[in-house]
Image: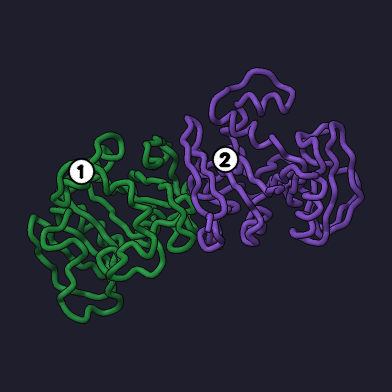
Chain colours: A green, B purple
Amino acid sequence: MSKLRVHCFSVSLDGYSAGPDQDLANPLGVGGLAVFGWQFGTRSHQQMHGGEGGTTGFDDDMVRQGFEGIGAWILGRNMFGPVRGPWPDESWKGWWGENPVYHTPVFVLTHHARAPITMQGGTTFHFVTDGIHAALARAKEAADGKDVRLGGGVSTMRQYLRAGLVDDMHFVISPALIGSGERLFQDLDLPTLGYELKGLTASPGATHVKIGKRVP
Amino acid sequence: MSKLRVHCFSVSLDGYSAGPDQDLANPLGVGGLAVFGWQFGTRSHQQMHGGEGGTTGFDDDMVRQGFEGIGAWILGRNMFGPVRGPWPDESWKGWWGENPVYHTPVFVLTHHARAPITMQGGTTFHFVTDGIHAALARAKEAADGKDVRLGGGVSTMRQYLRAGLVDDMHFVISPALIGSGERLFQDLDLPTLGYELKGLTASPGATHVKIGKRVP
């Protein structure tokens, strides 16, 4: 059974997963880089971006596992880019260059229709205008038996969690204080939504948490 | 220089420091015990409550250090008890029995005046009706050169942090999901208030975080 999985979604000590004022210079909002900083030094992250070296160990294992068995991705519009409202033209193709890290179909939630974009390396961005359930159905079909990974951002994550559609979630509490921005857990009652703590591991760089559906 | 210190204030993975619906049976709100559970098994906690045994190590060190060099405490009304509004009589004397754990003067913030209560073991509860600054001034005077410890609850903690009056804070992220209740970091921009991360240690039971004023 194909699952909807979240991996490596990061939260600051004070509860923020992105800083305020996202723009071209600050894809994660101002200060948001510190929240996801634990993974940049890992070998898997380095390799994914064409680099060499990097750390091995638990942080690295978590980054790598997040790409294993994934047949499609779902992203929110704001994770895809800083453009708001109707697409002014076809020029914006994501933050990730000509050969994005996904290498699968990627379904981008938006209110504004746009033709698919085929990138190098197997990534195709599809734009879904009829909501989170439709995006999940299309992603599962495209994944062809593999799992679907929900990438973010914060608002998209909350929507899928609130609908109870996320099967397994790995999130990471980072050693950073952000002070403002978007909160993952705002108005999100995970136990009532059927989620429970499945595991917790403190690495040198961060605290890794796994949650999933409570087994009845 | 006498400091205002916070120790062992605990937060769930999803950001709550107390569950909802505090009452006589649930001093920390429903589900709130899980948030502070990391400290109950420690030797210092056991000894403080007349027990024996208990764990040693980092968690225990943190509990013990929270009582060292403290000359007075400040508590919010809701941490002192479940009674709301005017005091119906003099019967409520806190959650902690005849010999409370404080062994110092304790200043309780309230809108409703009440005569001091002298308990066994050196604890006297004083009721302060003229606000957080007045309570801090009285506590510092009573502490006579020692530090003042701010005990909680959540609303009191936020008020003192927002006013920039807390000098050092140790808080603990507990392996628990609560889903609702009171959030420590709601509308609290710590970096803007001048606080920065001073240290982080993962113990087997919890993630310990120290924050303090940024050194200019």
Q: Amino acid at mark 1?
A: Ser
Q: Residues within 10 Å of mark 1 (few under 14, many from 20)?
A: many
Q: Amino acid at mark 2?
A: Val
- Whether residue A23 appears in this view of the structure is yes
Depth check, mark 1 against mark 2: the one in front is 1
Residue hosting label 2:
B35
Q: Is residue B63 above or below residue B147?
A: above
Q: Is residue A150 above or below residue A56?
A: below
Q: Considering the numbered disc 1 on the image, is that residue within a helix, a strand or a loop? A: helix
How many numbered callouts? 2
Q: Considering the numbered disc 2 on the image, is that residue within a helix, a strand or a loop? A: helix
On screen, residue A108 versus residue B38, left or right, reads left
Residue drawn 78% across the image and 55% down it: B137
Residue A147 point in image, percent of width and height: 22, 46
Residue drawn 38% across the image and 65% down it: A30
Residue B108 point in image, percent of width and height: 79, 50
Query: B37 or A35: which is nearer to us?
Result: A35
Residue B204 point in image, percent of width and height: 47, 30
**Which mark identifies residue A44?**
1
Residue B65 point in image, percent of width and height: 64, 34
